[in-house]
Image (tube, helix red, strand yellow):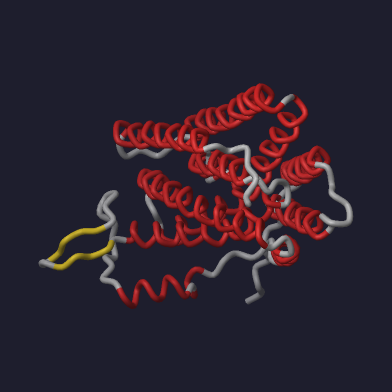
Amino acid sequence: MIESVGTPTLYLSFTAFVVVMLAIDFFGLKTSGDHKVSTKEAAIWSLIWISVALAFGGWFYWYLEGIAGPVVAKAKSLEYLTGYLIEKSLAVDNVFVWITLFGFFGVPPQYQKRVLLYGVLGAIVLRAILIYLGALLLAQFHWILYIFGLFLLYTGIQMLISADSEPDLADNKVLKWLRGHMRITDEYHGEKFFIMRDGLRFATPMFVVLIMVEITDVIFAVDSIPAIFAVTSDPFIVFTSNVFAILGLRAMYFLLADMADRFHLLKYGLAGILIFIGIKMLLLDIYKIPTGIALGVVGVILAGSVVASLLTSKPVPKTPPG
């Protein structure tokens, strides 16, 4: 049996809220037309999404205090805040991959926001399914937490080792398969994903980029969702913290797109967070690290890697002789 503070009414209300926010985002995309999102615009939207997520946390505390008392309200609200911070932190690596993808495919800046909007929609649906399945498995098999812990530990170590390497998109198997099984135009056609040419349907590079964006989110969801289950087994908290982090991803991308090199040590921090969460999971039946301490550790690691990045410059790769 899955234990959760989430009721059908809460789930429906939250889903309706998300749909409204996405509709506002989509409507804003339509009315603003094709344009490159400025750093100022991205910063404003990032602040809006973070404020909405924190406001929900405040409302969540108030709601639980009224039905379960301050002790439960404090514990569950702290779980939500910790889960949100973890998901928001790990989402940064997702953003870095998007930057690489858009650079590789040469996506014009004014078209990028459309791809990311549909990417966010797909990510929310995908994660809702994965969270539900994860909660069902944990309710039946407690030992899966150890599998999650080992996986996160391994992933963190791998990220630490390959922090300075760039993904090789030219050799990507999915990209090769798409190019071998679909008719794809060489040029962009505005924001269109498909066009008709000589009676045949062709995909544009925009569609290929969208597929790659969705696939990268599948990969990152496999890391981030188990990480939040290390903090809470409540699927409602896992779902809401995930969704709020995802809703702000588009704004985060445009905020970091022009300054990714300034945060060159951030991946080391993200690797440290994954390793810490993996260890926390493996120690769950020996010593349960309090949620407040976990929140502090994640915050310190994230802030430390950001500050260290700003205080140091990224090494310039050496040009081979000759």
Count of all numbered marks drawn on residues in the image: 0
Relative depth, front residue between 249 and 130: 130
Q: Quadrant of residue 303?
A: top right
Q: Residue furthest front?
A: 1
Q: Residue at x 62, y 37 (%)?
A: 5
Q: Position of residue 40 (x, y in %)?
A: 51, 30
Is 307 left or right of 9, judged from the image as shown? right
Q: Work out whether residue 311 can be spotted.
A: no
Image height check: is 24 above or below 123?
A: above
Relative depth, front residue between 239 and 169: 239
Is 93 left or right of 115, judged from the image as shown? right
Q: Residue at x 31, y 76 (%)?
A: 181
Locate the C terminus by quadrant. bottom right
Q: Position of residue 248 (x, y in %)?
A: 53, 39
Is 163 left or right of 169, judged from the image as shown? right
Image height check: is 263 above or below 106?
A: above
Q: Position of residue 143 (x, y in %)?
A: 74, 64
Q: Residue furthest right?
A: 286
Q: Quadrant of residue 73?
A: top right
Q: Work out whether residue 82 can be spotted.
A: yes
Q: Position of residue 238 (x, y in %)?
A: 61, 45
Relative depth, front residue between 46 and 106: 46
